[in-house]
Image (spheres, rainbow, N blue to C red):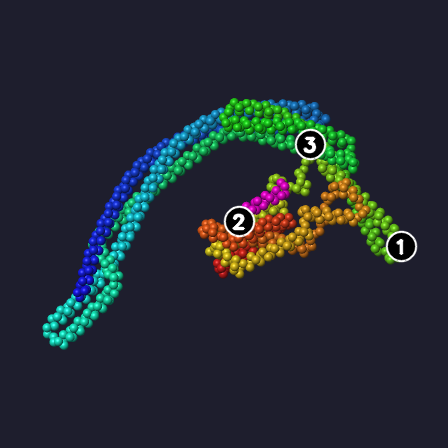
Amino acid sequence: ARGATLELEAIRRDLAAAQADAARELKGREASVMRVAALETALAAAEAREGEAREAVKSLQERNGKAKEVVLKQQDERKQLVSECEEMGRQLKVRSKEVERAQAEAAEAHRQLEKLKMSLSDAVGKASVLAEAKAAADKAAKGAASERDAFQAKVEKLGAAGAKVQAKLVAAKEELAKEKGASEKAIKEASALKKQLEVLSTTRERLERDAMRWREEAEDAQAESDAMRTRVSALERELAGAQGLVMQKELLLADLDPHALTNLKSERDAAADDANGFRTRSFGGGFADFSADFSAGFGDAGDAGDGSSNALQHERSMSDEERKEKAAALKAKTKAYVTELQQSYQVERAKLTAALQAAEAAASEARAELKSMAAAAASTIAEHEEKRVAAERAAALAAQDAAAQARHRPLSAPQRSTFETEVTRLRTELEVLRGASGAAGEASAASHVAAEWLAAGDRDSYERSLMRADAGHAARLAALTMALEKEASAQVEWQRIADAAKAEAEGTRRQLCALQRQMERLVSSQLDDDAAVNEVAAGKLAALTPQELRRQVASQRACIKSLDEALALAQARVHLLETARPVAAKPSTASDGKVPLLCVRIARWHAWFVGLIMYGIASVLKIVGFNLGPLTILGSIFVGALLVTNLFLGHWLLREEVTVTKVVGSLLVLCGSIVVIAATPSGVPTSFTSADMQRLLLSFEALYLASIVLIVLICFVFMFYVERTYPPPTTQAARRLRASRAASRAALSPTSPPSLHVAHPTLSTLPTTAVQPSLRLKSLMVFVYPGSLGLNEAFVDICARAYSTMLVRCVSQDGLASCHGWPLYLLMGTGIPAAFSTAYMLKVVFERFQTTLALPIEYSSLNLFSVMGGLLFFQEVDYMQHWQ
């Protein structure tokens, strides 16, 4: 009992020491409260500075309103000037159209004059009428020139007005720059206030964390103090019970005998043992329990200051909420003000930019007029260039005629003299047109220089350039008048020569048809003779000696040889007459190697290169799109849209026939794509890591990719064999094959004249029969060629989706180091070469088959194997429901 009393006194001393520590902690908390009060004082100062900033903002807004009023006035003035410029521009366009109409009337009058010159009956009367019309046209042209001068003066006035507007805009820009500087200053002040608010917010958050930590420590100390009180009260109760028992034993000690004293000692020892057991049970932790009891004393001291701490925490939370609200309001107001300043600056800048553009538009109208004159000069130059080409063609025709004169019948004397006269005239006209083209080029350059002077504000140089342009325009008008007169006469001569050449060509064609009919009769008679010989009996056949047979075969070969020579001469004559036509036709694809592309004609390989570039861009966009959803729905959308688009483009651009079978097949593929889109599962992953792709490549479903690669390689071997054995008629291999077979046939016929292949080069260009594949092989090719192309594209799409999703995942989330694995290199090493092989397969497939025929088969295969790749390889089937 005395030991327990000593321990209780030690515990009480520890509690007193803990109360002293709690008092010191309370003083520290009071110091924290003082710091919070100081921070609140700083916040009040920040609010005062915020009020000053608001006053500065109000003053800036007033100044901004004044600037807006000035800008609005300037915009009204600019709108008036723009309307005046537009009105002047419309009038200028109307006058320009009148000038062009007058020039067209003058040109029409000149053409009518030339036509009237060709008429010998009433040439004098019509010439006087045309002279009057020409005079009227010249008068109208002079009036139009004077009106043009007046409009040029108006354009100069508009240029002066535009300069004034430019000066006003410069002043407005300066004022706007000043306002911008003031706005930037206000923005800097607001940013400084924002930084102070951020510092206050950081300090407040730190104090909140300290208060939370103190609150948690106080709660822990309170809990330990409660536990210690409970244990101390239990000890005190047991100690009181033990003391009562001792007192009872001492009172009864006087009445007991020695035997009873012995019993009392034994009971006292038992009580000591019980006390020791109690001490062991209560303080079994030794020093650890004593330390816990010592720390529990902190809670007793905390009970004394619990009420004051709660009040302090309440006040602090209230002040924190107010500071938060004030800081948020100040931050929102500052952000709104900065946003408003930025928006007003952008609006004013856009308005001033539009004003500058409108002011420059007034000067660009004069440039437009000069550019139209330059365009007219360029068109005239192009016409002259066409005429020059026609003249050169005529010279080439003369050279061809001179070369053919040694082999064929020459032209008649009147045709020869007319042709030579026309060639001389065309050469003279070509020199005149070259001079006019040079003058037009100089005028165009002068127009560009004048436009630059007008843009730079050099009025004197601009007026001098206008005077020179007028003089050049008059000279060009005179030169064009002479050229048009000569052109009309040349056209009449060309028409007469063309009619004569056409009549001669018709006669030659009739002769050729007669020769062909004669040759057919000879061949049929020869066949009849052969049939008769085959029908003769053995005795009559013996009557024909070998010499008679040789003579008969030799006569037939001589007849066929003469027919071949006549046919070659007729073909060469027809070709010469067709090339001698004066009408310049567009070169065909077979002659110049060009193909139509929309409205132009370019080389075949250039068009193919443009198509490959567009195909590459579309492939890149498709790879990017593969990261947006499941492969089943993306592949189906791609196939459906592309099939319908290419079906329309094949009919529109390539003039391919769209039959009912093609339309039904395309609609069937499109319906299948719609069904696949409707049955697309949800929740399918669209991003894969290197580990995910490694798991897919090592799974059983990877056999699908291996089977695709094997089938594509087999189709490659089949296509290579077919292209080598049965080349298409348009390829170089087919031409070499036909040439070799023609040479072998020529070598096998010793009586055939070698001059046919030398003296008449036109015969070498005649089509010969190439070896064609069988019907069964053709049917197989129709499905293998486009189907293998679609299968290869499906494999490329699967690989592209795989490595593109891996790269996106590595760049955006996991880092580039996670991509250095064999799945990425394997997929890129097989997918990229397969993509390049698609370009060769495109050429091979669409060189043999029409677009509208091959596309449904290709995209059926592409859609089928893409959807199967999404379901099997990417395991999208695991996310599907039963109805899907």
For the point 78% across and 44% down, which residue is it?
754
Is residue 174 a member of the stretch shown in magenta? no
Is 745 positioned to the left or the right of 162 in the image?
right
Q: Mark 1 or 3 closer to N-term? A: 3
Q: Residues within 10 Å of mark 3 (few under 14, many from 20)?
A: many
Q: Do the residues under discs 2 and 1 have CB atoms within 8 angstroms?
A: no
Q: Mark 2 or 1 closer to N-term? A: 1
Please tell me which residue lies in front, 294 or 778: 294
Q: Residues within 10 Å of mark 2 (few under 14, many from 20)?
A: some
For the point 69% across and 27% down, which residue is it?
428
Main SS of residues in magenta:
helix
Residue 195: x and y, percent?
34, 41
Name the residue that disc number 1 marks: 543
Magenta range is: 602-622
Is 251 positioned to the left or the right of 322 in the image?
left
Residue 786: x and y, percent?
61, 52
Name the residue that disc number 2 marks: 622
In the rendered image of this protein, does residue 284 appear above or below residue 680?
A: below
Name the residue that disc number 3 marks: 391
In the rendered image of this protein, does residue 33 appear above or below residue 268?
A: above
